[in-house]
Image (tube, grey):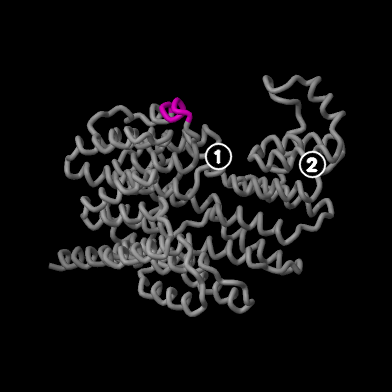
């Protein structure tokens, strides 16, 4: 009999975790109509402390239709989307509706902030008012869906575009290419590239760079070299991002010498390395065990006035920590401090303390307080870095607490963050909670990516639930994600373990 995926009722989750999840993860997404009502309710009086009711009423009387639209667009440009929605509510309360440009701006900014339900509600309102969304409006909403991994909603929108006679332009295909490459969907990526060639859309260095990344993630680094020759034949000049992706590809597959050749070629062409270049060189030299050269690149990077992504610094700290070189970790940090790096330095201090012997930031709330005290702008990436540091330590409760703090700051958890939670539970041997996160991701309408499936497979391997690994692998293939080399290795290890187990039972 075929093995079945282990069922896990929601009530088996720890109370702390359930309370930290967004409500939409527990009960599914609210309906578009409820979102529409929510938007309309913004016509209510202003919040205390911002302005008095009488002043607000005065502003309502004084503002013209043009003024409302100008303010909505200005707030969208500055990223103050809530102020734009407040103004939308005020307009509707007076029987007015924004211009199509104002609607477009709100859809774009809401999508960029991951608030796709509200973006979709405003999009539907446009159509209800008889305004015909343009190609750009569809692309704005598509971008929001794809960024959040809502591939089913994206597919429905593409069908609606076709039925409405809206042509897909180059931007549409670039958005799809980005999403499919990020999600590890090799066949879908090939389809997009084929469509772009068929429609004679321009293929530049950025398109080829994306293709390098999908080949990198699927173990096809030799195909990446073919892209270099294709670019040369077409006279396409590689951008810095292309060189960076090529270096990263060679590094990932242990071809360090080839990566250094690309780096030298990059320098000879007058292309200046950026933070991504240095990060890749440091990361893969760390993985290859050449810590001395990795630290050399780290020093050169600082001489250029650049500082590594906190995740890369975490890599260096982790390697030194494994060797028990805590004093060297502290010396590196003090050296960076003397060079005068900016506010992001507090993140490095926190990572050092999480990994070191000093125990200053073992409580993530103290981490966040320290970041705020330094005036650092909190973002999803900052929370992900901290969550990753705790996850690699197997500190599940602190990883969950980072998620809760993230929500308190009004930042929606993204797929990266949820993948880190799966990893934290997997490292701690709590595979049931890892499965629960996986199921919650699917229930919210977010499409798991290759990393999600691979991380869950690792969790089952750690828990010696080897029979579950092939099931997850099949689910990954069925979902349209192309298994990468790591996924294939995990599957192979699980199958070997199963064979050994069966052999012991027979004997």
Mark 1 or mark 2, whichever is nearer to me: 2
**Residue 50: image location, x then y, percent:** 69, 23
Residue in the picture at 71% in, 48% down: 105
Mark 2 crowdedness (10 Å alpha carbons): few <14, some 14-19, many ≥20: many
Q: Which residues are magenta?
A: 369-375
Q: Is residue 372 magenta?
A: yes
- Do the numbered discs 1 and 2 sit on residues whose CB atoms are within 8 Å? no
Residue in the picture at 31% in, 66% down: 261
Q: Earlier in the sequence, mark 1 or mark 2?
A: 1
Residue in the picture at 63% in, 63% down: 171
Q: Is residue 137 magenta?
A: no
- Which quadrant would residue 132 be assigned to in this image? bottom right
Residue in the picture at 67% in, 68% down: 168
Visible residue check, residue 456: no
Secondary structure found at label 2 = helix
Q: Quadrant of the N terminus?
A: bottom left
Visible residue check, residue 150: yes
Q: Nearer the viewer, residue 389 or 271?
A: 271
Res 23 label = 1
User: Looking at the picture, does residue 269 appear above or below residue 445?
Assistant: below
Res 133 label = none
**Residue 199: image location, x then y, percent:** 64, 76
**Residue 94: image location, x then y, percent:** 86, 35
Res 69 label = 2
């Amino acid at each position: 009999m075929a093995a079945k995926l282990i069922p896990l009722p929601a009530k088996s989750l720890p109370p702390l975790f359930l309370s930290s999840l967004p409500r939409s993860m527990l009960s599914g997404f609210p309906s578009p109509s409820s979102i529409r009502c929510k938007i309309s309710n913004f016509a209510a009086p202003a919040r205390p402390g911002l302005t008095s009711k009488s002043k607000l009423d005065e502003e309502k009387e004084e503002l013209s239709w043009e003024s409302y639209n100008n303010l909505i667009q200005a707030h969208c440009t500055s990223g103050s989307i809530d102020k734009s929605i407040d103004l939308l509510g005020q307009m509707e309360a007076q029987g007015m509706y924004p211009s199509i440009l104002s609607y477009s701006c709100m859809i774009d900014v809401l999508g960029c902030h991951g608030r796709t339900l509200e973006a979709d509600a405003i999009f539907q309102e446009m159509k209800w008012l008889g305004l015909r969304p343009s190609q750009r409006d569809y692309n704005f909403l598509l971008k929001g869906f794809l960024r959040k991994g809502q591939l089913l909603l994206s597919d429905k929108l593409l069908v609606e575009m076709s039925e409405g006679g809206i042509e897909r332009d180059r931007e549409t295909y670039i958005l799809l290419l980005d999403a499919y490459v990020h999600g590890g969907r090799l066949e879908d990526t090939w389809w997009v590239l084929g469509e772009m060639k068929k429609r004679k859309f321009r293929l530049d260095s950025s398109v080829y760079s994306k293709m390098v990344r999908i080949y990198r993630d699927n173990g096809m680094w030799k195909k990446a070299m073919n892209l270099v020759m294709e670019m040369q034949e077409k006279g396409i000049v590689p951008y810095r991002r292309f060189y960076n992706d090529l270096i990263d590809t060679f590094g990932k597959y242990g071809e360090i010498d080839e990566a250094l050749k690309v780096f030298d070629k990059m320098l000879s062409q007058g292309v200046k390395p950026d933070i991504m270049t240095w990060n890749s060189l440091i990361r893969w030299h760390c993985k290859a065990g050449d810590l001395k050269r990795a630290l050399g690149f780290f020093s050169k990077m600082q001489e250029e006035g650049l500082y590594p992504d906190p995740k890369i610094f975490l890599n260096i700290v982790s390697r030194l920590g494994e060797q028990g070189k805590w004093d060297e970790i502290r010396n590196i940090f003090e050296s960076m401090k003397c060079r005068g790096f900016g506010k992001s330095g507090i993140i490095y201090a926190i990572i050092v303390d999480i990994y070191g012997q000093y125990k200053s930031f073992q409580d993530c709330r103290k981490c966040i307080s320290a970041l705020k005290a330094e005036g650092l702008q909190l973002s999803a990436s900052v929370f992900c870095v901290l969550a990753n540091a705790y996850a690699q330590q197997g500190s599940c409760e602190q990883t969950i607490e980072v998620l809760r703090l993230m929500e308190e700051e009004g930042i929606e958890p993204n797929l990266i963050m949820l993948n880190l939670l799966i990893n934290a539970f997997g490292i701690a041997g709590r595979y049931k909670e890892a499965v629960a996160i996986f199921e919650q991701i699917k229930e919210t309408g977010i499409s798991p990516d290759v990393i999600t499936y691979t991380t869950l497979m690792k969790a089952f391997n750690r828990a010696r639930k080897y029979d579950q690994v092939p099931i997850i692998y099949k689910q990954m293939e069925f979902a349209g994600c192309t298994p990468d080399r790591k996924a294939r290795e995990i599957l192979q290890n699980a199958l070997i373990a199963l064979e050994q187990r069966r052999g012991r039972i027979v004997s």
